[in-house]
Amino acid sequence: MKSIFLFLVCLMILSCHQNKKQVTMSKKIVIAHRGASGYLPEHTLEAKAMAHAMNADFIEQDLVLSKDNIPIVIHDIYLDDVTNVATIFPSRNRKDNRFYVIDFTFDELKTLQVTERFNPKTGEQVYKNRFPKGKGNFKIHSLQEEIELIQGLNTSTEKNIGIYPEIKAPEFHQKEGKNITEIVLKVLADYGYKTKKDNCILQCFNAQELERIRKELKSELFLVQLIEHPKQAKELKHFATYADGIGPWYKQILASKVKDQYSFTSLVSDAHQLGLKVHPYTFRADALAEFDTFEEMMQTILIDANVDGVFTDFPDVVINFLKENNNEY
Ligand code: G3P
Ligand code: CA
Protein backbone atom coordinates (compact mmCIF):
# COMPACT_ATOMS: atom_id res chain seq x y z
CA MET A 1 0.00 0.00 0.00
CA LYS A 2 2.81 2.34 1.06
CA SER A 3 4.73 1.63 -2.14
CA ILE A 4 1.65 2.33 -4.28
CA PHE A 5 1.26 5.67 -2.49
CA LEU A 6 4.93 6.52 -3.07
CA PHE A 7 4.59 5.53 -6.73
CA LEU A 8 1.58 7.87 -7.13
CA VAL A 9 3.43 10.76 -5.46
CA CYS A 10 6.39 10.22 -7.83
CA LEU A 11 4.02 10.23 -10.82
CA MET A 12 2.45 13.52 -9.65
CA ILE A 13 5.88 15.16 -9.20
CA LEU A 14 6.96 13.94 -12.65
CA SER A 15 3.79 15.22 -14.28
CA CYS A 16 4.15 18.67 -12.60
CA HIS A 17 7.73 18.79 -13.79
CA GLN A 18 6.68 17.98 -17.37
CA ASN A 19 3.94 20.63 -17.33
CA LYS A 20 6.41 23.22 -16.09
CA LYS A 21 8.83 22.17 -18.81
CA GLN A 22 6.16 22.77 -21.45
CA VAL A 23 5.55 26.29 -20.17
CA THR A 24 9.16 27.34 -19.85
CA MET A 25 10.34 25.76 -23.13
CA SER A 26 7.48 26.93 -25.28
CA LYS A 27 8.12 26.71 -28.98
CA LYS A 28 8.41 29.81 -31.15
CA ILE A 29 5.49 29.97 -33.57
CA VAL A 30 5.53 30.65 -37.30
CA ILE A 31 2.53 32.59 -38.60
CA ALA A 32 1.93 32.40 -42.35
CA HIS A 33 1.39 36.10 -43.12
CA ARG A 34 -1.56 36.30 -45.57
CA GLY A 35 -0.76 32.59 -46.26
CA ALA A 36 2.42 31.54 -48.05
CA SER A 37 2.24 34.97 -49.68
CA GLY A 38 5.87 34.98 -50.80
CA TYR A 39 4.91 32.31 -53.37
CA LEU A 40 1.22 32.81 -54.27
CA PRO A 41 -1.03 35.91 -54.29
CA GLU A 42 -1.82 36.94 -50.70
CA HIS A 43 -4.98 35.75 -48.99
CA THR A 44 -5.95 33.28 -51.73
CA LEU A 45 -7.08 29.81 -50.70
CA GLU A 46 -4.13 28.49 -52.72
CA ALA A 47 -1.70 30.51 -50.56
CA LYS A 48 -3.40 29.16 -47.43
CA ALA A 49 -3.23 25.53 -48.61
CA MET A 50 0.47 25.99 -49.37
CA ALA A 51 1.10 27.45 -45.89
CA HIS A 52 -0.72 24.46 -44.41
CA ALA A 53 1.45 22.04 -46.40
CA MET A 54 4.53 23.92 -45.15
CA ASN A 55 3.42 23.28 -41.54
CA ALA A 56 3.09 26.88 -40.40
CA ASP A 57 1.78 26.89 -36.81
CA PHE A 58 -0.87 29.50 -37.64
CA ILE A 59 -2.33 30.90 -40.85
CA GLU A 60 -3.39 34.57 -40.91
CA GLN A 61 -6.74 36.03 -42.07
CA ASP A 62 -7.17 39.81 -42.41
CA LEU A 63 -10.92 40.54 -42.33
CA VAL A 64 -13.18 43.15 -43.91
CA LEU A 65 -16.99 43.01 -44.32
CA SER A 66 -18.82 42.83 -47.63
CA LYS A 67 -21.98 44.88 -48.29
CA ASP A 68 -24.03 41.86 -47.17
CA ASN A 69 -22.01 41.43 -43.95
CA ILE A 70 -19.85 38.45 -44.94
CA PRO A 71 -16.34 38.56 -43.42
CA ILE A 72 -14.01 38.61 -46.44
CA VAL A 73 -10.35 37.56 -46.20
CA ILE A 74 -8.46 40.53 -47.64
CA HIS A 75 -5.80 42.86 -46.28
CA ASP A 76 -7.34 46.26 -47.01
CA ILE A 77 -10.75 47.88 -47.01
CA TYR A 78 -9.95 48.49 -50.73
CA LEU A 79 -10.08 46.05 -53.65
CA ASP A 80 -8.07 47.84 -56.31
CA ASP A 81 -4.53 46.76 -55.36
CA VAL A 82 -5.16 43.00 -55.43
CA THR A 83 -8.04 42.52 -57.91
CA ASN A 84 -9.31 43.53 -61.34
CA VAL A 85 -12.27 45.44 -59.84
CA ALA A 86 -11.46 48.61 -61.86
CA THR A 87 -11.97 46.63 -65.09
CA ILE A 88 -15.06 44.67 -64.04
CA PHE A 89 -16.93 47.47 -62.17
CA PRO A 90 -15.37 50.69 -63.58
CA SER A 91 -18.01 53.04 -62.15
CA ARG A 92 -18.19 51.65 -58.62
CA ASN A 93 -15.33 53.68 -57.13
CA ARG A 94 -15.87 56.34 -54.44
CA LYS A 95 -14.83 60.01 -54.66
CA ASP A 96 -11.29 59.15 -53.58
CA ASN A 97 -11.09 56.89 -56.66
CA ARG A 98 -10.80 53.74 -54.52
CA PHE A 99 -13.01 50.65 -54.74
CA TYR A 100 -14.25 49.52 -51.32
CA VAL A 101 -14.95 45.90 -50.34
CA ILE A 102 -17.93 47.13 -48.30
CA ASP A 103 -19.65 48.48 -51.46
CA PHE A 104 -19.90 45.00 -53.03
CA THR A 105 -21.95 41.92 -52.19
CA PHE A 106 -20.19 38.61 -51.70
CA ASP A 107 -21.63 37.39 -55.03
CA GLU A 108 -20.16 40.43 -56.80
CA LEU A 109 -16.81 39.99 -55.08
CA LYS A 110 -16.73 36.39 -56.28
CA THR A 111 -16.71 37.58 -59.91
CA LEU A 112 -13.33 39.33 -59.45
CA GLN A 113 -9.91 37.91 -60.22
CA VAL A 114 -7.37 38.19 -57.41
CA THR A 115 -3.80 38.88 -58.39
CA GLU A 116 -0.38 39.53 -56.91
CA ARG A 117 -0.35 42.91 -55.07
CA PHE A 118 0.30 45.96 -57.28
CA ASN A 119 0.25 49.73 -57.13
CA PRO A 120 -3.19 50.75 -58.51
CA LYS A 121 -1.82 54.08 -59.78
CA THR A 122 1.09 52.67 -61.77
CA GLY A 123 -0.03 49.07 -62.22
CA GLU A 124 3.42 47.96 -61.06
CA GLN A 125 3.78 44.70 -59.07
CA VAL A 126 4.99 45.43 -55.51
CA TYR A 127 7.27 42.39 -55.00
CA LYS A 128 8.90 41.93 -58.40
CA ASN A 129 10.05 38.32 -58.08
CA ARG A 130 6.84 36.88 -56.69
CA PHE A 131 3.95 35.20 -58.52
CA PRO A 132 3.41 37.11 -61.80
CA LYS A 133 0.64 39.72 -61.67
CA GLY A 134 -2.45 38.91 -63.75
CA LYS A 135 -1.63 35.21 -64.09
CA GLY A 136 -3.66 32.29 -62.76
CA ASN A 137 -7.27 32.11 -61.66
CA PHE A 138 -7.60 33.23 -58.04
CA LYS A 139 -10.81 34.27 -56.28
CA ILE A 140 -11.92 36.20 -53.21
CA HIS A 141 -13.23 34.02 -50.36
CA SER A 142 -14.93 34.36 -46.98
CA LEU A 143 -13.67 33.59 -43.48
CA GLN A 144 -16.05 30.64 -43.35
CA GLU A 145 -14.58 29.17 -46.55
CA GLU A 146 -11.05 29.57 -45.25
CA ILE A 147 -11.81 27.99 -41.89
CA GLU A 148 -13.43 25.05 -43.68
CA LEU A 149 -10.29 24.66 -45.80
CA ILE A 150 -7.95 24.74 -42.79
CA GLN A 151 -10.11 22.53 -40.59
CA GLY A 152 -10.61 20.11 -43.51
CA LEU A 153 -6.86 19.94 -44.14
CA ASN A 154 -6.28 19.46 -40.41
CA THR A 155 -8.53 16.41 -40.58
CA SER A 156 -7.12 14.92 -43.77
CA THR A 157 -3.46 15.50 -42.80
CA GLU A 158 -3.91 14.86 -39.06
CA LYS A 159 -2.42 18.26 -38.21
CA ASN A 160 -3.66 20.94 -35.85
CA ILE A 161 -2.77 24.20 -37.58
CA GLY A 162 -4.35 27.28 -36.05
CA ILE A 163 -5.96 30.41 -37.42
CA TYR A 164 -4.83 33.98 -36.64
CA PRO A 165 -7.66 36.36 -37.73
CA GLU A 166 -7.30 40.16 -37.67
CA ILE A 167 -10.26 42.50 -37.41
CA LYS A 168 -9.45 45.32 -39.84
CA ALA A 169 -10.56 48.92 -39.34
CA PRO A 170 -13.41 48.47 -36.82
CA GLU A 171 -13.85 52.27 -36.70
CA PHE A 172 -14.37 52.41 -40.48
CA HIS A 173 -16.95 49.60 -40.30
CA GLN A 174 -18.68 51.42 -37.45
CA LYS A 175 -18.99 54.57 -39.58
CA GLU A 176 -20.51 52.45 -42.33
CA GLY A 177 -23.08 51.15 -39.83
CA LYS A 178 -21.52 47.71 -39.43
CA ASN A 179 -20.24 45.82 -36.40
CA ILE A 180 -17.46 43.69 -37.83
CA THR A 181 -16.25 42.39 -34.47
CA GLU A 182 -19.50 40.79 -33.40
CA ILE A 183 -19.99 39.19 -36.82
CA VAL A 184 -16.45 37.74 -36.78
CA LEU A 185 -16.74 36.46 -33.19
CA LYS A 186 -19.96 34.67 -34.13
CA VAL A 187 -18.33 32.92 -37.13
CA LEU A 188 -15.36 31.91 -34.98
CA ALA A 189 -17.64 30.52 -32.26
CA ASP A 190 -19.74 28.64 -34.85
CA TYR A 191 -16.55 26.86 -35.97
CA GLY A 192 -15.47 26.02 -32.42
CA TYR A 193 -13.05 28.88 -31.71
CA LYS A 194 -14.10 30.19 -28.30
CA THR A 195 -11.25 29.88 -25.80
CA LYS A 196 -7.45 30.02 -25.65
CA LYS A 197 -7.34 26.23 -26.12
CA ASP A 198 -9.02 26.41 -29.52
CA ASN A 199 -5.95 27.24 -31.62
CA CYS A 200 -7.13 30.68 -32.67
CA ILE A 201 -5.36 33.97 -31.96
CA LEU A 202 -7.41 37.11 -32.54
CA GLN A 203 -5.53 40.33 -33.38
CA CYS A 204 -6.42 43.98 -33.90
CA PHE A 205 -4.55 47.29 -34.25
CA ASN A 206 -7.39 49.19 -32.60
CA ALA A 207 -6.68 48.98 -28.84
CA GLN A 208 -10.11 50.22 -27.78
CA GLU A 209 -11.77 47.50 -29.82
CA LEU A 210 -9.50 44.71 -28.57
CA GLU A 211 -10.14 45.81 -24.99
CA ARG A 212 -13.89 45.80 -25.71
CA ILE A 213 -13.58 42.26 -27.11
CA ARG A 214 -12.20 41.05 -23.79
CA LYS A 215 -14.01 43.24 -21.28
CA GLU A 216 -17.45 43.89 -22.80
CA LEU A 217 -17.90 41.03 -25.24
CA LYS A 218 -16.23 38.64 -22.74
CA SER A 219 -14.23 36.77 -25.36
CA GLU A 220 -11.97 34.08 -23.89
CA LEU A 221 -9.82 33.83 -27.03
CA PHE A 222 -6.06 34.45 -27.02
CA LEU A 223 -5.85 38.17 -27.94
CA VAL A 224 -2.91 39.97 -29.53
CA GLN A 225 -2.66 43.76 -29.50
CA LEU A 226 -1.00 44.91 -32.71
CA ILE A 227 1.30 47.91 -32.31
CA GLU A 228 1.88 50.42 -35.07
CA HIS A 229 3.59 53.34 -33.31
CA PRO A 230 6.69 53.02 -31.09
CA LYS A 231 5.08 55.32 -28.48
CA GLN A 232 2.48 52.60 -27.83
CA ALA A 233 5.24 50.63 -26.07
CA LYS A 234 4.44 52.86 -23.06
CA GLU A 235 0.97 51.30 -22.89
CA LEU A 236 2.12 47.72 -22.31
CA LYS A 237 0.79 47.58 -18.76
CA HIS A 238 -2.65 48.56 -19.97
CA PHE A 239 -2.49 46.07 -22.86
CA ALA A 240 -1.74 43.34 -20.32
CA THR A 241 -5.11 43.97 -18.63
CA TYR A 242 -6.89 42.41 -21.63
CA ALA A 243 -4.39 40.98 -24.13
CA ASP A 244 -2.22 37.86 -24.06
CA GLY A 245 0.37 39.16 -26.47
CA ILE A 246 1.56 42.02 -28.65
CA GLY A 247 2.32 42.21 -32.36
CA PRO A 248 4.84 45.02 -32.94
CA TRP A 249 6.54 46.05 -36.17
CA TYR A 250 9.94 44.30 -35.92
CA LYS A 251 11.77 47.65 -36.11
CA GLN A 252 10.32 48.55 -32.69
CA ILE A 253 12.50 45.79 -31.23
CA LEU A 254 15.75 47.04 -32.75
CA ALA A 255 17.63 49.88 -31.00
CA SER A 256 20.91 50.31 -32.86
CA LYS A 257 23.66 48.53 -34.75
CA VAL A 258 27.27 48.99 -33.75
CA LYS A 259 30.02 47.02 -35.49
CA ASP A 260 27.54 44.49 -36.90
CA GLN A 261 26.05 43.96 -33.45
CA TYR A 262 22.40 44.85 -32.83
CA SER A 263 21.13 46.12 -29.52
CA PHE A 264 17.44 45.95 -28.61
CA THR A 265 14.79 48.14 -27.09
CA SER A 266 13.25 46.89 -23.83
CA LEU A 267 9.98 46.04 -25.63
CA VAL A 268 10.41 42.25 -25.58
CA SER A 269 11.65 41.99 -22.00
CA ASP A 270 9.03 44.47 -20.74
CA ALA A 271 6.29 42.47 -22.47
CA HIS A 272 7.62 39.19 -21.11
CA GLN A 273 7.68 40.61 -17.58
CA LEU A 274 3.99 41.37 -17.98
CA GLY A 275 3.33 37.85 -19.28
CA LEU A 276 2.72 39.01 -22.85
CA LYS A 277 3.92 36.96 -25.84
CA VAL A 278 5.62 38.92 -28.65
CA HIS A 279 4.86 38.17 -32.33
CA PRO A 280 6.50 40.82 -34.57
CA TYR A 281 5.60 41.45 -38.21
CA THR A 282 6.68 40.97 -41.03
CA PHE A 283 9.63 38.79 -42.12
CA ARG A 284 10.09 38.99 -45.89
CA ALA A 285 13.04 37.26 -47.53
CA ASP A 286 12.71 39.64 -50.49
CA ALA A 287 12.48 42.91 -48.46
CA LEU A 288 15.37 42.87 -46.01
CA ALA A 289 15.75 46.62 -45.29
CA GLU A 290 18.58 46.95 -42.73
CA PHE A 291 19.63 43.29 -42.85
CA ASP A 292 22.17 41.85 -45.29
CA THR A 293 20.53 38.42 -45.38
CA PHE A 294 17.27 36.78 -44.28
CA GLU A 295 19.35 34.50 -42.07
CA GLU A 296 20.69 37.57 -40.24
CA MET A 297 17.16 38.91 -39.77
CA MET A 298 15.89 35.61 -38.34
CA GLN A 299 18.92 35.18 -36.06
CA THR A 300 18.72 38.76 -34.78
CA ILE A 301 15.02 39.00 -34.02
CA LEU A 302 13.86 35.45 -33.49
CA ILE A 303 16.84 34.22 -31.49
CA ASP A 304 18.85 37.18 -30.15
CA ALA A 305 15.85 39.40 -29.35
CA ASN A 306 14.00 36.31 -28.05
CA VAL A 307 10.53 36.88 -29.50
CA ASP A 308 7.88 34.16 -29.27
CA GLY A 309 6.83 33.94 -32.90
CA VAL A 310 6.82 35.81 -36.16
CA PHE A 311 4.59 36.78 -39.08
CA THR A 312 6.30 35.79 -42.31
CA ASP A 313 5.52 35.62 -46.04
CA PHE A 314 8.03 32.72 -46.22
CA PRO A 315 6.92 30.21 -43.56
CA ASP A 316 9.00 27.35 -45.02
CA VAL A 317 12.24 29.29 -44.68
CA VAL A 318 11.55 30.35 -41.07
CA ILE A 319 10.45 26.82 -40.12
CA ASN A 320 13.68 25.36 -41.53
CA PHE A 321 15.71 27.98 -39.71
CA LEU A 322 13.98 27.20 -36.41
CA LYS A 323 14.42 23.46 -36.92
CA GLU A 324 18.13 23.99 -37.36
CA ASN A 325 18.10 26.03 -34.15
CA ASN A 326 16.03 23.40 -32.26
CA ASN A 327 13.15 25.89 -31.75
CA GLU A 328 13.29 25.51 -27.97
CA TYR A 329 14.98 27.94 -25.67
O1 G3P B 1 -1.35 41.60 -38.45
C1 G3P B 1 0.00 41.60 -38.27
C2 G3P B 1 0.63 41.71 -39.59
O2 G3P B 1 -0.19 41.14 -40.55
C3 G3P B 1 1.00 43.09 -39.99
O3 G3P B 1 -0.04 43.85 -40.32
O4 G3P B 1 -0.69 45.36 -42.13
O5 G3P B 1 0.16 43.09 -42.73
O6 G3P B 1 -2.04 43.33 -41.60
P1 G3P B 1 -0.67 43.91 -41.78
CA1 CA C 1 -2.58 41.35 -40.56
Image: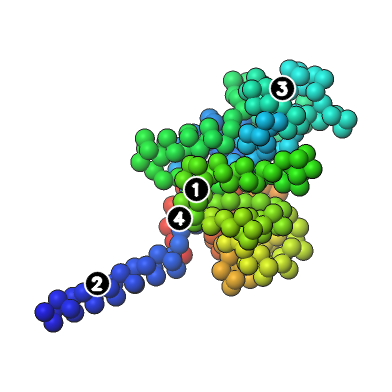
Quote the CA–CA distance across marks 2 and 1. Answer: 33 Å
Quote the CA–CA distance across marks 4 and 1. Answer: 8 Å
Upstream in sequence: badge 4 or badge 2: 2
Quote the CA–CA distance across marks 3 and 1. Answer: 33 Å
Neighbours of disc 3 within 10 Å: few (<14), some (14-19), many (20+): some
Q: Specify the amino acid type for callout 2.
A: Leu
Residue 111, quarter of picture: top right
In screen coordinates, is 187 left or right of 251? left
In the depicted structure, whether residue 197 falls above or below residue 317: below
Residue at 64% of width from left, 40% of height from top? 63
**Residue to which mark 4 is pinned:** 197
- Percent across and percent down for residue 14 are 28, 72
Residue 134, quarter of picture: top right
In what element is the residue under mark 1?
loop
- Percent across and percent down for residue 303 are 54, 61
Residue at 43% of width from left, 57% of height from top? 326
**Which is nearer the eye, 278 or 260?**
278
**Residue to which mark 2 is pinned:** 11
Front label number (3 vs 1)? 1
Mark identifier at residue 193: 1
Upstream in sequence: badge 2 or badge 3: 2
Neighbours of disc 4 within 10 Å: few (<14), some (14-19), many (20+): few
Front label number (4 vs 2)? 4
